[in-house]
Amino acid sequence: MAKFTSWFKERTTKSSDSETEKAESPLGDSKEKEKSTDAQNQPPTQLEKAKQRLVQLVAKLPGGHKPLYRRYWFWAGLGIGSGIVAISYGVWSIDRTLPEKTELNAVVREQTLTIKAADGTILQQQGEATREQLKLEEIPDQIQKAFIAAEDRRFNTHNGVDAQGIVRAVLSNVRSQNVVEGGSTITQQLARILFLKQERTVLRKLKEARLAQKLEEQLSKDDILERYLNLVYLGSGAYGVADAAQVYFSKSVNELTLSEIATIAGLPPAPNRFSPQVNLEAAKQRRNLVLQRMYEDGYITAAQKQAAVAEQLTTKPSSPKRWQVEAPYFISYIQKELPKYVPAEILNAGGLTVETTLNPTWQQAAEEAVAKTLRNQGRWENFKQAALVAIDPRSGEIKAMVGGRDFDKNQFNRVTQAKRQPGSTFKGFVYATAIAAGKSPYNKYLDESVVIDGYEPKNFSERFSGWMNMRDALTRSINVVAVKVLLDVGFQPTIKLAHNMGIKSELKPYYSLALGSNEVNLLELTSAYGSFATQGLHVEPHGITRILNRQGKEIWSADFKPKRAIDAETAAIMTWMLRNVVNAGTGTAAQLGNRPVAGKTGTTDDARDLWFIGYIPQLVTGVWLGNDDNKKTWGSSGSAAYTWHEFMEEAVKEMPIEKFPERPQVEGRKGIIKVQPVKPRKIVKGSAASAEATVDEGSSGRSRRRRSRRRYSQQEQQVDQGPRRRRRYYQQENDDSSTTRRTRRGFRNSESTAISNSESSSSDNSQRRSRRLRTDFSRPRYSSNQSSWRERLRPSSSQ
């Protein structure tokens, strides 16, 4: 009764509230009714239908009367769903650690570096690199089938992972109680080679399988097989089938017999264990197993199999070609240049292929020319090192580089690392500055005894020739005139022009600058002379043309643009003057028949450095001879010119003859460089200069004969104005008189005679013709305790 009363009260209260709401909003009630009616009349949505079906399905399942958490199918479904989620997450997590899709086209291993010559031949390989990569069509069909039979019988049908093969491998290994068969497909092995480390973990195996599937999606079967056959490690340092054929049998892949093919195809599971060089019996057993599988798969007949099994397995070992290094000094230069063009992280990752400018034929000719000079002249003239570099002046590409005698004993590159005084080769920049300033090569200077602020330039002949024009002074390499020209044009214009032409080393404003007192390296000096060959344009010397990543994509390419260093007229006039050096001056040993050649010789104190820088329109080459410890030699720059000739004679064999531009008008030209003449504090000339020099020497406590003063020697001073006999690699020295000089101590006990100038009498010439010349150079007498001209005074800032 109490419950009924309570219910009644609630009912009354609700009715009252309802009536109140109706009284307050009579229209609202009618709207609600209309909405309710419309909702009932609308058809159920797809979601509602799905819910109804799910409820009906759940009601029909076993245990429909039980709560959901007590139904076994609920937990089964939850477990399966969780497994699917976990697997999906695991695959996603593994995929995050794998290479991007664009990286799957890799064709070389990581941590490798391959350096190639201009013609594509390999100069050096570092790391686990394949020396000879072949296209699939270049690999014999029997080799392809042998590897498929041995490593992956269902290669052409699976998607990267062969579940049947894995089960078969497990059963085979259990039966034999040893690992006799692997479960990895060829695609999985390729994935491991290219992207994974060799640790034996479950995670690595999962990554390998996933990568294999991605590779199958990205590459064709032929691409996968080609990469595998070129990259698989086959023992004894051989990577790929071509390397293995060379290492084990000293053959190309096309020369291998079926027995040898099967032997190589059996190596991948355990290259060292099955190597015929290590274990011949194990190699035979493995070979026979491969032959059996090839027979079972229908790749060979029973007769072929029996013949191959019966064949004697004989190896003919060779060292892996990837251990061979060509042009080692050039390679060391390239390795030092790489960080300029490629970020450190890319270099550390490796897999790069570097295409270079080197011409292998010219490189061989350069090495032979240097070796020949060191073997002959080096032994006689007391120099033990040499360097040579050849550059295409139009592109700046380095075509040949020899940095020393023996790279294995000394890796110091004398082309790029050694800085030496260039001697008279620097005169080319002094005279070029004068020509660019508007001077005529026929402008005359007085070759005389002179002391400039205490500095006394001396000619090698120890004599003076009087008035002569700049062209003749350059031809005969007259030191006094070169210094006077420098005084006329100024230090800074000369230094600026030399830098514009390619000299990178610091050049200091000393009077001796004209004679090459500032040290430079052979590469920059040779490159700078190339600006004469290209009518005043200079291109930065370089040895790399392209750098490719692991996918074979270009990540850097050379784009060196020519820059104007000097005007074309100046370059043409200088080439005309330098041609005369080769035709009638100090560089006659460099002549190349009817091919025009221009160049300049150079020699420093005591012949410590012997130079020749010469060029034709297509090629500029520089040669240096000397000793690393700076010991004096008994040679002349003629030996350097001879070395240049020996190399160039081979390099130009297939090269058409090109002429230099015609010499422009030399008179009335307007200069494009503003001179800054040097004004010395004190200049003493003639006999007074000799007296001043004597007083200077006496006051400094160094009394001795004036002729024994150490000077910047110029052994190359001579003019070809009289008949002479010349050994093929020497050049005749000229003097202003017919005086016979003393031969150098320690050299052959032979007579050395200077060629007379145009003022010599015919009787002198007759006497000289009758004299048998056994050497073509001579040396001044030196005093060991004399200080060098390099210690002379530097001009004051007021100058």
Image (cartoon, helix red, strand yellow):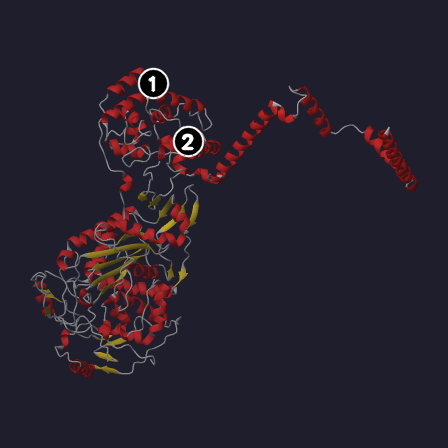
Choose mark 2 or mark 1, whichever is in front. 2
Q: Residue at x 27, y 42 (%)?
A: 323
Query: Tag 2: Cα neighbours inside 10 Å, few (<14), some, or many (≥20)?
Result: many
Q: Which residue is mark 1?
A: 295
Residue 499 placement (x, y as % from top left) = 36, 65
Rendered residue at 36%/17% (across/down) = 296
Q: Residue drawn at (38%, 41%), measured in percent from left and top?
A: 110
Q: Amino acid at mark 2?
A: Gln
Between 226 and 605, the one lying in front of the other is 226
Q: Residues within 10 Å of mark 1 (few under 14, many from 20)?
A: some
Residue 497, image quadrant: bottom left
- Provide residue 542's location: percent of width, then percent of height: 35, 54
Q: Quadrant of residue 548?
A: top left
Q: Vertically, is 593 above or below 761?
A: above
**Residue 675 spot, x, y in % from top left:** 37, 75
Q: Which mark is residue 188?
A: 2
* Above-or-below relation of 110 to 486: above
**Quadrant into which the C terminus falls:** bottom left
